[in-house]
Amino acid sequence: MFIFEKRTQIPVCIKNRNPRLAGIIISQYGGPDGELSASLRYLSQRFTMPDNMGKALLTDIGTEELAHLEIVGSIVGQLTDGEGAKSFDKYGRGDYYVDHGNAVYPQSAAGSPFTAAYLQSKGDPIADLVENLAAEQKARATYDNILRLSDDPDVNEVIKFLREREIVHFQRFGELLNIYQSRIDNENC
């Protein structure tokens, strides 16, 4: 069902190492509004969409979110590549290093590990799509916050790309919600 291409949607080539910035960006890997949550949410919700159009959209966006997970993981990995305990500690990320070394671990910027409690799958197309609209806006807002905290142009270029994709996903979910809501309205007339 999935086809893997050995490249990311946008090249990730970070020149400067920065565990502090990695500790912020990790939230989009495994935090409450991150890419792992989004992909699992959409790939779970697709099974209860009422038609192939809804299933296809959720599958497409869910798999794209997996690609975004790879991009975010690449950013974090490159920001910490070759950095040791002293470097992590210098940036206030020694606690992360103690538990994970240079590994990319799914957690929020605050250090909370990923949990399935971050996502919702209700089985009602309207409720799930409204949930998804909110999720895309929260992801966009998180990317905005990252951009406010980052001064690395290599990182910012990739973050801006991911932010734009959140906006596109929001638009697609809104279009599908309008179609489903119109159907319900017509049935109730």
Image (cartoon, grey):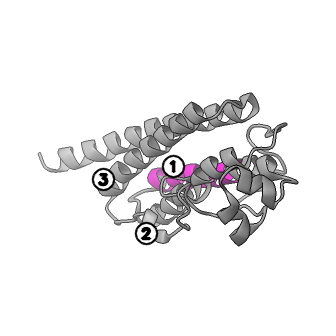
Residue 65, above or below 151: below
Relative horizontal placement of residue 155, taking residue 16 as reference (left or right): left
Q: Position of residue 108 (x, y in %)?
A: 55, 58
Residue at 11% over, 45% down: 189
Relative horizontal placement of residue 51, taking residue 185 as reference (left or right): right
Q: Is residue 46 magenta?
A: no
Q: Say which element carries label 3.
A: helix
Q: Quadrant of residue 29?
A: bottom right
Q: Which residues are magenta?
A: 53-71
Tell which of 80 and 73 is nearer to you: 80
- Please give the residue where the numbered disc 1 appears in the rendered image: 57
Of circles 2 and 1, which is in front?
2
Q: Is residue 60 magenta?
A: yes
Residue 117 shows which numbered tag? Answer: 2
Q: Say which element carries label 1.
A: helix
Residue 178, above or below 70: above
Hey, what amino acid is under mark 1?
Answer: Leu
